[in-house]
Amino acid sequence: MNDPNLLILASLADGDKHGYAIMADIKAFADVELGPGTLYGAITRLEERGFIRPVGTDDRRQPYRLTADGRRYLEEELAVLQSVVRVGFRRLGKA
């Protein structure tokens, strides 16, 4: 799974993070390395859709927070993925 949007939303599901922390978290849980261009392009799109928002800070690093709409979207997309995984494993004789 390497959809930057879902990976970023999943990373933010357990709390606010700035860009580098999001990249490190995604590498840790999904073993996917997002480059800065991919990360910040996706962050911009997620902000525009209202799924994440910046959190005020005095630090030069900008943390982001998952919104209620972002949480709902993530839950819906994960439910679809879960269904696909279930079917795939069943068809492979693994479930």
Image (spheres, helix red, strand yellow):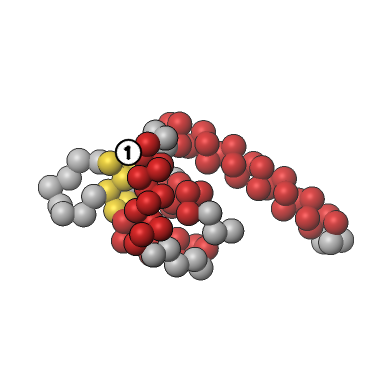
Residue drawn at the location 31% of the way across and 56% of the way down: 19
Question: Is residue 88 depicted above or below 49 in this figure?
Answer: below
Q: Is residue 81 left or right of residue 62?
A: right
Are there few (<14), some (14-19), or many (20+) residues within 10 Å of tag 1? some
Residue 84 percent location from the top left of the image? 72, 49
Q: Nearer the viewer, residue 48 or 32?
A: 48
Amino acid beneath label 1:
Arg
Residue 38: x %, y % from top left = 40, 58
Q: Quadrant of residue 92?
A: bottom right
Q: Residue at x 83, y 55 (%)?
A: 90
Q: Residue at x 37, y 48 (%)?
A: 43
Work out which quarter of the rendered image holds the C terminus and state it.
Answer: bottom right
Query: Which residue sits at x=29%, y=53%?
Result: 18
Question: In this rendering, is residue 47 above or below 19?
Answer: above
**Position of 60 compared to 6: left or right?**
left
Find disc 1 in the rendering and name its residue: 53
**Residue 14 appears in view:** no
- In the rendered structure, the answer to whether residue 75 lies left or right of residue 79 reads left
In this view, the residue in front, 36 or 55, is: 36
Query: Which picture quadrant has residue 1?
Result: bottom right
Q: Quick check: 23 left or right of 88?
A: left
- Residue 71, x across and y down, in percent: 48, 37
Q: Position of residue 76 (x, y in %)?
A: 59, 37
The answer to whether residue 93 is above or below residue 72 is below
Residue 58 seen in the current view: yes
For mark 1, give the secondary structure.
strand
Q: How many marks?
A: 1
